[in-house]
Image (cartoon, helix red, strand yellow):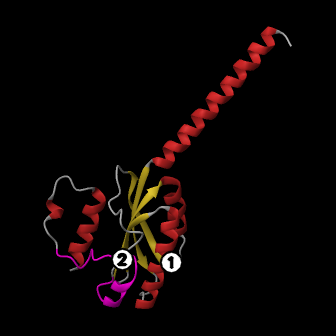
Amino acid sequence: MTEADTTSCTARRCEFFVLLYRKLVAKLTLMDTLYQIVYTSTATRPFSKADLGELLQGSVQRHTRAGITGLLLYQTGTFIQALEGEKAALTELFEKISHDPRHHHTIRLIQGPIKERNFPNSAMAFRDLHSPDLGKLPGYSEFLNTPLNGELLAKDIPACKRLLLVFKKNIR
């Protein structure tokens, strides 16, 4: 092997590692970027307390494993859900949600990167105002039971929280 061949081989090897490094950095950047999807849908039939409990328990387990947090609100057949996590995981989850036969008319309201989680302590939570027993389940949120406090009027509130607060205000 000549010196020119060795130099050429080294240059190709360097190019390969530079491309590999760039792909790895791009993938890690995507993984580290927090993403959010907020959607609304309509239940195909009313959810019972048992249905809601089952939905909550299954969601908490799956979403915790996937690093997904959020808030799922349910009232009188209407769902609104905010999901936060890695973009790839959310895209895959939303695809499954869109084909779930328990609801239809799924409309994506917000989608995009976020700087921080709005619901960092919640694997998944929801509230049906007529089901107080659900409050005992892990992952339950008091979001719909707390009074409105003027937060909706704040200028710096994230769009996701504003949307959920509007939902909360309009179901009372």
Asked where in the image residue 17 lies, by quadrant, the reply is top right
Horizontal side, residue 36 vs residue 144: left or right: right
Residue found at x 48% / y 74%: 59
In the rendered image, residue 9, in percent from the top left (x then y), is placed at 76, 19
Horizontal side, residue 172 vs residue 97: left or right: left
Measured along the vertical axis of the image, is residue 22 above or below residue 12?
below
Q: Earlier in the sequence, mark 2 or mark 1?
A: 1
Closest to the observer, 105 or 79: 79
In the rendered image, residue 165, in percent from the top left (x then y), is placed at 24, 68
Asked whether 119 falls inside the magenta stretch, the response is: no
Measured along the vertical axis of the image, is residue 140 above or below residue 116?
below
Residue found at x 36% / y 62%: 120
Main SS, magenta region, reads loop
Start-end of magenta stretch? 128-147
Horizontal side, residue 135 vs residue 4: left or right: left
Q: Which residue is mark 1?
A: 58
Horizontal side, residue 13 vs residue 105: left or right: right
Closest to the observer, 154 or 69: 69
Residue found at x 40% / y 79%: 138
Q: Amino acid at mark 2?
A: Phe
Mark 1 Cα-neighbour bin, 10 Å: few <14, some 14–19, many ≥20: few
Measured along the vertical axis of the image, is residue 140 above or below residue 163?
below
In the rendered image, residue 103, in percent from the top left (x then y), is placed at 47, 77
In the rendered image, residue 2, in percent from the top left (x then y), is placed at 84, 10
